[in-house]
Amino acid sequence: MTSFAARSAGEIAQRGRPHSPLRRRWSEKTIRAILFLLTLLTVVTTVAIITVLATETYGFFTLAGHPEISLWGFFTGEEWSPLLGAEPMFGVLPLVCGTLLVTAIAGVFALPIGLLTAVYLSEYAAPRTRTILKAALEILAGVPTVVYGFFALTFITPYLLQPLSSGFGAYNAMSAGIAVGIMILPIVCSLSEDALRAVPQSLRDGAYALGSTKFDVSAKVVVPAGLSGVIAAFLLALTRAIGETMIVALAAGGLAQMTANPAAQVQTMTAYMVQIFLGDAPAAGIEYKSSYAVAFTLFLITFALTWTGAIVLKRYREEYE
């Protein structure tokens, strides 16, 4: 028994003995190198994606034998019909219009509901209620987007929209926008709630001490104090909505047109890329090349939104001690 205790004490002392300075330096260098390589991997991946998009887009605009392709015509043209056997028209505005229409519908649906839900979870809900609702939101966030697309086709359009108006066909922008709004709702709720809960309790206590009601504190103190985080959540959700693919490919339709009618079918930029990469277009054809130009345009739009979000965060961020 005594020898066992002595041996255990010796092992503990051996484990507690500090490493040599040389070994510590090598460990720190190894960890630093691994972290640097992982960081470099993200940078290299981003640069590679941008390089591929830029290279293929340049190849599309310089494609021999197609003088109808021009940079000005691509970004200002109002007709998009790059189909085989027809006179090709490469004006990206109809695809941009369809994308923005679906995104606007999704934003009108999801942003107010998401913010109000975040205010309830942050300021009104009991801990148990908050836990249950947060779990439900996490489940909603885990639903595959293709399920949302079929949900729009089989429920939103026939049971919610068509009874309201006969103008809604099987495919329409409203149905796709509502489904996209449901998809981005957990993003808005979660990030907005985090921003609101980060507001110091002292601000709430000060407002209560002045005689404010719960609603006054929530609407006039907490939301303005966490506004930068809320706006960042909105922009992130809209960026996610712009890049959504399966919902719009299934529910929005395939007609690229300039319209603001939510009952009309539209084609978004991502839906067009899905159509091209199904394999019907030849890999070296002009239709295949045009998908990269559309993808690069989509990248520019999402980059602009992300950059705007960074500016908003920097401009309106509140720091508390």
Image (spheres, rainbow, N blue to C red):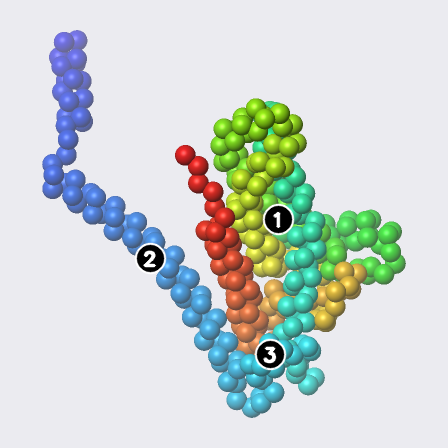
Q: Secondary structure at mark 1?
A: helix
Residue drawn at the location 77% of the way across and 63% of the way down: 261
The amino acid marked with disc number 3 is: Phe
Spot occupied by residue 118 in the image (x, y as percentages of width and height): 61, 38
Sequence-wise, which precedes: disc 1 or disc 2?
2
Q: Which residue is mark 1?
A: 184
Q: Is residue 33 above or below residue 3?
A: below
Q: Secondary structure at mark 3?
A: helix
In the image, which disc is placed on residue 300? none
Occupied quadrant, residue 209: top right
The answer to whether residue 28 is left or right of residue 98 is left
Residue drawn at the location 15% of the way across and 22% of the way down: 13
Residue drawn at the location 69% of the way across and 61% of the way down: 101
Q: Which residue is mark 2?
A: 40
3D distance between C-alphas at marks 3 and 2: 35 Å
Q: Is residue 321 above or below residue 181?
A: above
Q: Which residue is mark 3?
A: 74
